[in-house]
Amino acid sequence: MSINPLSKLYQSELGQETRNSQNFLSFKGTESRSELDLKKVWDVVRRRKIFVSTVALILFTATMAWSTTRKPVYMSVFRLLIEPSKSNPGQQLGVALDEQAAGTNYTTLTQVLRSSQILEPAFKSLQKEYPSLTYDKFLGNLSINRLKETEIIEVSYLDNDANQSLSVVEKLADTYLNYGEQLRSRNLQQGIKFVEKQLPTLYRRVNQIQSQLESFRESNKIVNPEDRAAYLIKMSGDIEAQQKATQARLAESKALYATLSKQVGSSPEVAIASSALSESKTFQALREQLQQLETQISINTERLTPDAPPVKALMKRRDGVLAQMQLEAKRTLSTTGTQQAQGNLSGTLIELNRQLVTVSNEIKALEARNQSLLGTAQQLQASLTTIPSLVRQNVDLQRELKVANDSLDRFLANRESLQIEAAQNTQPWQIIASPAQRPAPVFPSIPQSAALGFIGSVFLGVLAGLLVDKLDDVLYSAEDLKQDSKFPLLSVIPFYKNLGELSLPAMASLRNLPAASEGSTQTAQTFSIDLSEDAAIFREAFRTLNLSLSMANLQNSLQSIVVASALASDGKSTVALNMGLAAATMGQRVLIVDADLYRSKLHTYAKVTNEQGLSQYLTSDVSVHHLVQQSPMEQNLFVLTAGKPQMDASRLLSSAKMKKLMEELKEHYDLVIYDAPPVLGFSDSLILSGQTDGSVLVVGLGNTGRTALLESLRGLQLSGSPVLGIVANCLKPGTHLAHKYHEYVRRNYNSDVVETV
């Protein structure tokens, strides 16, 4: 594989790497709660797979054994088509009948079909053939359901006896068909009775409205108010035209009368003659008679033709009066003037007087006609104002009469329709699927029982596994560890089964890689290293651990720390070694001190000898510099082994010589890591913690319990040194967190960097 130099990753991109490490520590918060819960369940199932499988197998076996020993249950079924009556009187007449409501409400209908009133006769008939049949069993095994969104009712019956199951549904089919016929007949008869009951009321209503309409027409002397209104409007227009013509003729006549009057008094001779004639009583009487005749002629010519006998007679009488007036004028004027004046004035005066009389009579006739037309127009206008009210009353009566007639016609038509339908012998309900028995028992169904038994057994097995896991005190996940400890989770170390196979030459090659200069765009030189992806992720976890410690203690530089565990076999020595190796790779001078004087293992992992070590230094005068060995894994990594086991290790570690050594080591190394014994059962870790900058507690997942964790943390806190955090060790592959760790590394680093780690 090809790799990039680590120097660029650790030096020029240290800030970015720090952020990536922090992101990994908090990656769990970015996933949904439901997904996390499912993954936790899966982790429990993996841990308890034997227990879960055993419980599921036992339950599945019991389910199948129970199913195969049950008596078979047979089902018989038929389907019934429910057709609501097309001549439903309740729907057509706008009323609701209780019996008909069950015909369209299928929920009510199914309850009616299960009622004792319908089922009891069928049950008694069946009980004669099957004496052991009880009504409760009969009703309990009966099922009536409507097929979704259809008018079909499915009736089924379950029984251990196949023949009895079929006999029951056959009997029920006949019973329901008879009930449907009875229901139809009852509904039709009730509909007919309802119609006949309503008809007298409808007849009375029609007659009442017709009487009101007749009274309305008689009282107003009108048949159709709309026609009357049209006639009055036309008459009003004609009268208005006549008024205008009469007023025009009246104005002309008045003007002519004024002209004639001026002519009569225009000359002295005419004035004298007119004065003499005005004093003649005979002449004035003839003049009045002439005026009356002119008036009569004017009146008669309005309604008769000029050739009519009455008009001719009046004109003849007028001519006679005019002749008499001529003679009287001559006689009167003969006494007042000369014969010549008499001859000249008599004709002129007679003609002028005749014209004046004619015009005067015409004026009077026109004025009378104008007044008559005015009165007629007022009467027409008064009649027109009453028309809207009459029209509204007539429309209301006509509408009421139409509604009443329509209702009467509808009831009559429905009565005839119901009578015809009642006379017909038709089945309202139909059997569309004849009573038949299912070919195989519906219970027990081996495939169904196997499927349900498998699902139920697996579910209960998982549930039992979760319960057992909940009662277990051992910590199995980093999530539980972080929640229970309340201390920072510095890193999660994945499980790596080939820990001893990490190539030491490869680690040396990592150290000797040339660094790429900052800002260079040229790809760094690559080397082939046989390092698997699991090993890369394993190393990345320790880089994360070191970066987490650095970020958490920016203000106080860490020069010495204690790596301890709650119990043995938690992997503290492995963590201490790889933690120091990661720091040394980043350029620090690191010393790892194996302070476990009871059962030291660090020298085995570090590939160094353990002939002499810390115990020899504390019990003799040998110089510590002769005891410190350089690790073949990294030139900046040094190891001080434990040496020969000591039974009184606590006394040695708490001695003044040990304290002096710890201070001296701080001056010679950038970081000193003490691999201490387990906290529980030994005081060595507490003694060492009090002399260092802090302690890190390693917890082996699947090995350490909650109680041991809390007791260890409490002991470390009592030492006076701060607890820097917790390291979760030996995260098994395939768990939720291990999978997310792999995905994180792949997502945040390119392939070269992954191989480098």
Image (tube, rainbow, N blue to C red):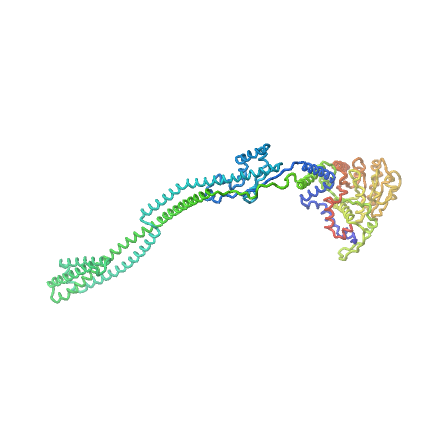
Q: Quadrant of residue 524?
A: bottom right
- Number of marks: 0
Question: x, y (%) of residue 82?
Answer: 53, 43
Residue 345 visible within the image: yes
Q: Nearer the viewer, residue 617 or 756?
A: 756
Residue 717 visible within the image: no
Above or below, comparing residue 542 to residue 129 in the picture: below
Residue at the outermost bottom position = 340
Question: x, y (%) of residue 378?
Answer: 30, 52
Q: Nearer the viewer, residue 626 or 733?
A: 733
Question: x, y (%) of residue 449?
Answer: 67, 40
Q: Nearer the viewer, residue 599 or 688?
A: 599
Residue at the outermost left position = 335
Residue at the outermost right position = 621
Give left or right: position of 383 versus 585: left
Question: x, y (%) of residue 656?
Answer: 84, 37
Above or below, comparing residue 527 to residue 121 in the picture: below
Q: Nearer the viewer, residue 360 or 255?
A: 360
Residue at the outermost front position = 129
Q: Quadrant of residue 199?
A: top left
